[in-house]
Image (cartoon, grey):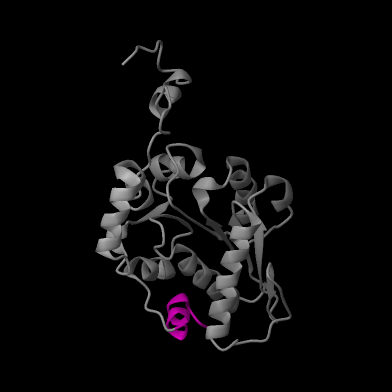
Amino acid sequence: MLDPCALFAAAGMEPDPWQAELAQTPHHRVLVLSCRQAGKSTATAALALSTALRRDGATVLLVAPSLRQSTELMRKVRAFYAAAGRPVDTDAESVLRMELPGGSRIIALPGSEQTIRGFSAVDLIVVDEAAAVPDETYYSVRPMLAVSGGRLIAISTPRGKRGWFYRAWAEGGNHWQRIRVTADDCPRMDTKFLAEERLEMGERWFAQEYLCEFLDLEGAVFTDEMLAAFTDEKVSAWEPV
């Protein structure tokens, strides 16, 4: 069956080096810190479809902060499927779901802990815009990989120094593979456009959206490091900076 890079070729696209790295990595836990418009949803859509095509009975879940976003990711899965010439007939297909003859299925879900439970033995969980997915949702999906030994791919633009995605990137240890994709790594980014964006957005927003920097919340009285110190048992007293 088609691997992710072959799906890119079938769609008339050449994967960027980081997309090819993601497609070929054997790691089971991957974080992709990506700038805006780098092709992160395209890369994960190809990976999701390839997983379902290559393994009978595979379950692939597409998780995003909202159902609209996960539906958009499913739309890209279906676009790759069409570009590949619909290599097998689907047993069922909708805006939220694709089921293949061998029992594999790809399902788009919203990032809501209340509605996401109930799946087991999952082969691949893709978390799109992961920095905006709540902690409780993330902790709800992880046990779905316990029996299957499945993969977790989380991909996002940064959204400040908070949340599970930031902690996994900054403190998560060696069991995570980390891929960082800034605007400089995206050959489709026009340098003139980026210069205009820097001018219009200012250095702070540009650093977050295009240079993948985790920033403290603008206007906050305390930095995230100061807030963390309040609950650190090793810190006996907080001193003003």
Q: Is residue 62 visible?
A: no
Q: What secondary structure is the stretch in magenta mostly built from?
A: helix
> Relative to residue 217, is residue 152 drawn left or right?
right
Instruction: Report x, y in % for residue 232.
Output: 45, 21
At horizontal 43% and vertical 43% (from top left) the residue drawn is: 172
Instruction: Report x, y in % for residue 114.
Output: 73, 46
At horizontal 34% and vertical 13% (from top left) the residue drawn is: 240
The quarter of the rendered structure image containing the C terminus is top left
- Residue 188 position by quadrant: bottom left
Magenta stretch encompasses residue 125: no
Q: Is residue 154 visible?
A: yes
**Residue nearest the viewer, comparing 105 with 83:** 83
Instruction: Report x, y in % for residue 36.
Output: 41, 57
Segment colored magenta: 1-11
At horizontal 43% and vertical 51% (from top left) the residue drawn is: 157
At horizontal 61% and vertical 55% (from top left) the residue drawn is: 145
**Residue nearest the viewer, comparing 70 with 122:** 70
Instruction: Report x, y in % for residue 18.
Output: 35, 65
Magenta stretch encompasses residue 4: yes
105 above or below 240? below
**Residue nearest the viewer, comparing 179 with 16:** 16
